[in-house]
Amino acid sequence: MRSFSVLGFEASNIVSLTASLASKYQVSLSAKNEDEIFAKGKDLESFFTELKTLFNQRVIVGNIYKAFLDTLVSKRLTLSMAESCTGGLLASKITAISGASQSFKGSITSYSIESKVNVLKVPKDIIDTFGVYSEECVKHMARCALELFKSDIALATSGICSPIENLPYNLKLGNVFIAIVSKDKLPLVTKESFEGTRIEMQTKACKQAILNALSYLS
């Protein structure tokens, strides 16, 4: 059994679109979640080979963190991060991959408002105006990491993984903002919504950040 994702497509749609191809190679497919698919069968290699001819570089087989690092290395890009709600988990998953030092320059866990302002240098008026759980804040976090580490690309996360009363701006538990910035492309900022325990939401946020970044670089 092997897992895979196709960037830009929901897992359920890929299962439907590739049903005949899977049948051709006697492979059974099941959607694990919105992004990841499990493939099980006799001729997985042939199945993935033909799948890649259909979707090209959008097909990610196996560990997405390794696939992301491989992409950075192949493009000769360096990476930095600023994490809030994920609390360093994303950096941990990146550095768990052998050879991460070829691309990864570092990360700051700016969990408090003070660390966002004093360490990352996010403008205080951005936080006062839009709040820490916002597209504006997370975009500035990523930009500050990019500048601080002098990297080619930077990721940032900020969101709500534990219950908080009286949330503003129609925010709710599970909302996570993810930003990706680089030197030569427009930034990408998304607002996600996750469910589960605190660690499950943090883990999902990490994975979504990498999926977003792979799409951003494709």
Image: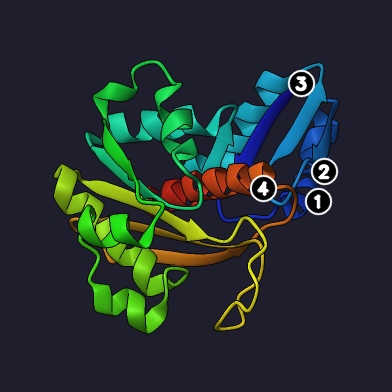
Cα gap from disc 1 to disc 3, whole angstroms: 19 Å
Q: Is residue 23 above or below residue 162?
A: above
Q: Residue at x 69, y 30 (%)?
A: 3
- Where's the N terminus, which quadrant? top right
Q: Residue at x 78, y 46 (%)?
A: 15
Q: Pointer 1: what residue?
A: 16
Give the colour scheme of this rendering. Answer: rainbow
Q: Residues within 10 Å of mark 1 (few under 14, many from 20)?
A: few
Q: Pointer 3: what residue?
A: 1
Q: Residues within 10 Å of mark 2 (few under 14, many from 20)?
A: some
Q: Pointer 4: what residue?
A: 198
Q: Are marks 1 and 2 in contact (CB under 8 Å)?
A: yes
Between disc 2 and disc 4, whose residue precedes?
A: 2
Tell me the quarter of the picture where residue 128 sits: bottom left
Between disc 2 and disc 3, whose residue precedes?
A: 3
Label 4 amino acid? Arg
Cα gap from disc 2 to disc 4, whole angstroms: 35 Å
Label 2 amino acid? Ala
